[in-house]
Image: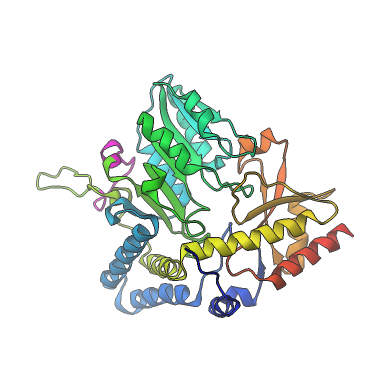
Amino acid sequence: MSTPLSTAAVDALRAQTPGTQTTTHFNHAGASLPSSATLEAIHAQLWREATMGQMEAGGFGREQSERARQLAAQLLNAQASEIALTTGNSFAWGAAFAALGRLKSGERILVGRHEWGGNLAAMRIAARRDGVSIEVIPCDASGATDPHALEAMIDERVRLIALTWLPANGGVINPAAAIGQVARRYGIPYFIDGAQAVGQVPVDVVALGCDVLTGAGRKALRGPRGTGLLYVRQDFLSRVTPAFVDTHSAPLDAAGEPVLRNDAARFELAEASLALHGGLANALKEALDIGIDNIRARIDSIAQHLRGQLAALPGVTVLDLGVERSGLIAFNVAGLDASHVQRSLAEQGVTIGSNGVAYTPFDMESRGLQEIARASVSYLTTDAEIDKLLNGIRALLR
């Protein structure tokens, strides 16, 4: 049950977030604004390393890494042993995909139409190398990935089902749990790209039925760039061998033979930024303290309001799909390239994103889109900021 964040609570959170004083930020889906406490956690570990020596300060840093792992497990309803700390979402997803090993000629990979371009790059290289096909799961009438259409595609050659849960190019929230029910019914590995989901919507990996889920620290979690999360279901670990290991992920035994760790840390390396892990731990704790249900409710309310306001502007087309929607609002302004809209608003002190075909190629091509402008909100977003964004767009329309 969510408890609406009061104006006073939001004001207090903004007061603890330096970026809210210097920018009007509508690119939270690209990277959100970290709190002062997150910055202080990073700085504290860097100071220890500077004054004690980096190796000597490692003990406290590793405590923060384990704290981040425990908090991430709590956030995702996972076991700590199922969580790896990574350098970002794309690295996490790519590492898990590479760990599947060589695919067999004739095998099939089924993906949602909104699949992230970086994931597709990894899959297409493997498809060319191994002679497998990548096939798009059709969408339902709302534009969301259709679980019934997926089930009709299943046969013994399907090696992987991959879904980007909250796509980068608009507001749709795909039915990840329903897709997971199909995957589990047929025993097919199921990967969820949760880059935009983790920290924005409730995530329960058990209910989702996924084998792998990835998340980014810098997006809705408001953590530091260069951090990410990789969940690997315990029973799935035995089916994946990382493409690269070291003495942290596969320490040598007495005979000098590498022994893969029996937890998700087999995807970690000895060299990691313990300072960033401290920042990530703080960001995770803040999200849990606020409550993901509360975060989701406020983001949904703000995003619905902004969508309506944008749709009411002559010359603006809102491009979001789906019934259930996220805090990412895709739109275009008639006669203007999205990148031009982004630059012009930046000159007015308002930051948004703009995406091209490479972000979500299947979906953009299917809808005949070359570029979209993207305003993404946070629970920190205020009505005054929305007014400034809308006024900036009105100025462009004039």
State which quadrant residue 384 falls in.
Answer: bottom right
In this view, the residue farthest toward the right is 398
Main structural element of the magenta stretch: helix, strand or loop? loop
* Vertical side of 202 occupied by 58: above or below: below
Q: Residue at x 69, y 61 (%)?
A: 305
Q: Is residue 300 magenta?
A: no
Residue 63's x, y, as percent? 28, 68
State which quadrant residue 374 falls in.
Answer: bottom right
Q: Residue at x 45, y 34 (%)?
A: 161
Q: Is residue 211 left or right of residue 343?
A: left
Residue 166's x, y, as percent? 55, 48
Residue 356's x, y, as percent? 67, 44
* Vertical side of 383 occupied by 176: above or below: above
Residue 328's x, y, as percent? 62, 54
Q: Nearer the viewer, residue 159 or 351?
A: 159
Q: Nearer the viewer, residue 126 or 19?
A: 19
Q: Residue at x 13, y 47 (%)?
A: 253
Q: Quadrant of the C terminus?
A: bottom right
In this view, the residue farthest toward the top is 106
Task: Decide if residue 188 is in sight here.
Answer: no
Q: Nearer the viewer, residue 58 or 71?
A: 71
Q: Which residues are magenta?
A: 236-249
